[in-house]
Image (cartoon, rainbow, N blue to C red):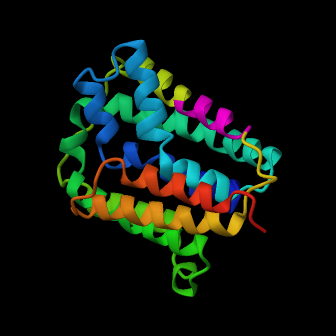
Amino acid sequence: MVLEQIDDGAQRLLLVLCLPLIDGVFATLLVTGAVSTFSDIITVGLTIFTGAGALAVLYSESESRAEAFSMVNQVAPVLLAGAVVVALVAPVFDEIFYVSRLKYAAGLALLTISGKLVDIDLAEKFSVPAVIVTGMFLSLRSGASLSTSLEYVLPALLTSGAAIGGLYLASYVSRENLSLKYIRGGGAVVLTVISASLFGFNVPSHLSLALFMFSIVLSYNRG
């Protein structure tokens, strides 16, 4: 499996980045024309993909700029490939999967990552890739037929490329004055909030970003 060839931190970053691919959000944006312009591509890439959750994992799992770059280098090819696959099947995504079930699987994966960030023993017993793969298997519609189209491949590549570019820019943030303890705790809270929204709870759209920024403020000049 591809995930086994990259380190744990990069795996967690990749799985957070791939949530829009897994839960059907990106497929929906593609077929509705929501990423048809340059500004749309940049906005979706830097918010839907490189949001607070991805930044939280990037900062909490890397202690230097070099480590952050290494993580992004590892996830970039997989994210691009995943975006292409979703672009190919986007017109019939809802016919292949029960998206509501996928969201539950994605939420459980985020809770597992959250627990791992703060060293909860129970979370260490679960494999995040296994949770995702099992969720995708259980979400398959019986008798679904796969149909592909090249129409959305270019917008998908450009949008995921914008997300990767955002991660590279974020990697330049200096960690010398940041306490990893607060970053990891903040990241765990952010991922828990995002998972709650996937489970159907009414969560304010900007809450996760606000919480992550608050954790950055708490971490600065500590330790």
Query: Is the N terminus in the top left, top right, bottom left or bottom right quadrant?
Result: bottom right
Q: Position of residue 53 (x, y in %)?
A: 49, 52
Q: What residue is shown at x 21% (from left), y 59% (from top)?
A: 202
Q: Position of residue 86 (x, y in %)?
A: 38, 35
Majority SS type along the magenta span = helix
Residue with the most extreme bottom position: 121
Residue with the most extreme top position: 37
Residue 185 vs 34, above or below: the answer is: below
Q: What residue is shown at x 47% (from left), y 66% (from top)?
A: 189
Does residue 115 appear anywhere in the picture? Answer: yes
Q: Hey, which quadrant is residue 93 in on the image?
A: top left
Does residue 84 appear anywhere in the picture? Answer: no
Q: Is residue 46 left or right of residue 172?
A: left
Which one is in front, 76 or 58?
A: 58
Residue 179 vs 142, above or below: the answer is: below
User: Could you tell me how many numbered marks the image carries?
Assistant: 0
Q: What residue is shown at x 38% (from left), y 58% (from top)?
A: 194
Q: Is residue 61 left or right of residue 203?
A: right
Which one is in front, 152 or 36?
A: 36
Query: Is the C terminus in the top left, top right, bottom left or bottom right quadrant?
Result: bottom right
Q: What residue is shown at x 36% (from left), y 47% (from top)?
A: 206
Q: Is residue 8 left or right of residue 22?
A: right
Q: Is residue 198 left or right of residue 130?
A: left
Q: Position of residue 216 (x, y in %)?
A: 61, 55
Q: Which residues are magenta?
A: 163-172
Question: Is 118 within the magenta?
Answer: no
Q: Position of residue 118 (x, y in %)?
A: 59, 75
